[in-house]
Image (tube, rainbow, N blue to C red):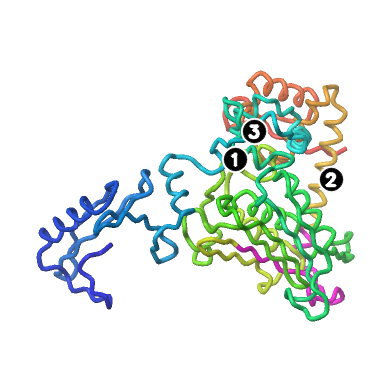
Amino acid sequence: MIFGVSNDERLIGLQNVQDTSEKISEIIKTKMDPIPQVVLDNHIEDGKAFIILRVLPGQETPYYYAADGNHIAYVHVGNESAPADAIALKRLVLRGTNMTYDSIVSSYRFQEFSFTKLSSVYRNRTGMELSDSYFISFELAAENGKLTNAGVLLADESPLKHSRLFCTRWYGLDKVSGVMEALDDKEYSGSLVSLLQNGMEFVKNNSKKRWKKTGTGRVEMPEYPEQAVHEALVNALIHRDYMEVGSEVHMDIFDDRMEIYSPGGMPDGSIVQNLDTDHVVSKRRNPVIADIFSRMHFMERRGSGFKKIKEDYHRAVNYRSEVEPLFQSTASAFFVTLYNLNYHVPIAEVLIDSEKVAFDNEKMLIDREKLLIQKAIDELKVTKRTKVKAKMLFTEMGMERIFGRREIMQMMNISITAAGNLLNNLKNGGLIEDVKGFGKGKYKFIKLSK
């Protein structure tokens, strides 16, 4: 805040900087609870004196305005401040106690619920069993035998009824076509893993994929890039505000677009349409849920999903500026609009960009390399579990990334001995090679030619 500027933004300066500084400090000390940490600086501009007040990020939320018989907490939304409602106040209390909604211990007992879907998917994607001890170390359950809210959301029959996914394929371009309302609609409940899988299956069943021949094969042209849809749906389920009890995640598919809505705006209160989405720092509203999904390789531990969604669109054959994905948010809602790449684009008029053909050919080569590596892993004389771990490592690292025992330990949550054994099996099978210049014990996968 700058003191010395008029309401019409004229720089008028201050008559007595010392007196004004003391008044500001006194107001902060007597009318705020707890007292925030601030920095007051004097500034001279064109011979005029100003005071710049910087309020540092506070960890003891909520901060109250406590004066005139009031005790009110405010929240900042966009460029405005407003009194915090009951839900916003709960969020501030959680932040002040260094907790998140998904980490809170619930009243539900671990032994009263089943986790067959979570355990099955975890085993298939990591090669490891999800033992009871993992539930505690992953913060899905507490030492007292109670589930955290994250654990409740991942149970097969989750008792949190507002954790649902509504999917609708509408007729036409809006929800009121005048002919018929919906071509298909589904309501899903249960584990978050099931919601993700069911949502992706709904999109697959309600969208089409074109293809067109080229000189070297064919290029596929889906209505929606699969990875972009997956990323948007993962973000909607994992980063939604589960304190908004009366709302669910919605996926609405129209002829020309897909809209995904999730309760809760940006975690920091910013408005996404005012930001550069290529450089938004990733902030996780539900870090416990995000961590388990990262371990199952449904999402990355790093980076923003906005950029990944746009990159998937930019690589598509039918991409043009008017189908750029759209991100919008309010204080209590987040919307992603993914446009149908093939809408009103006759296949005969599709011009295959040479760079995209090159990218597609490169993708075919990469896919061939993947098949060769996976075949070679299948031929290793090791246990089935080791083969699953080897494939998981290759899926994560690909042909270019460099790794060692530490990276394997962190990725798979295994011991240093187990990580070393996996490396030895891959070396003995001729699938990885030493990489110099990155420290001792660094490797990458070998490109196979047979």
Question: What is the number of the mark on residue 106?
Answer: none
Q: Magenta segment, which residues?
A: 335-359
Q: Mark 1 sits on what residue?
A: 149
Q: Which quarter of the rendered picture does the C terminus lie within?
A: top right
Q: Nearer the viewer, mark 1 or mark 3?
A: 1
Specify the label residue 368 is tagged with: 2
Q: Residue furthest top?
A: 417
- Image quarter for residue 211? bottom right
Callout 1: SS: helix
Q: Residue at (57%, 52%) from the top-left corner? A: 241
Between 214 and 377, the residue placed more toward the observer is 377
Which comes before the other along the chain, label 3 or label 2? Answer: 2
Query: Of circles 1 and 2, which is in front?
Result: 1
Q: How crowded is mark 1: few (under 14 residues within 10 Å), some or many (20 or more)?
A: many
Amino acid on which disc 2 is placed: Arg
Q: How far apart are marks 1 and 2 (CA)?
A: 42 Å
Inspect the image, locate mark 3, and give the three-letter code of the amino acid beneath it: Met
Q: Residue drawn at (64%, 21%), measured in percent from left and top?
A: 415
Lower position in the chain sequence, tag 1 or tag 3: 1
Mark 1 and mark 2 residues within 8 Å of each other at the beta carbon: no
Q: How far across and how far down the image is residue 345, in percent?
A: 80, 76
**Quadrant of the rendered structure where residue 41 is?**
bottom left
Q: Quadrant of the N terminus?
A: bottom left
Query: Would you say 349 lies left or right of 17 here?
Result: right
First in residue order: circle 1 vs circle 2: 1
Mark toward the viewer: 3 or 2: 3
Report x, y in % for residue 427. Answer: 75, 25
For mark 3, what is the residue?
A: 411
**In front of the other: 354 or 391:** 391
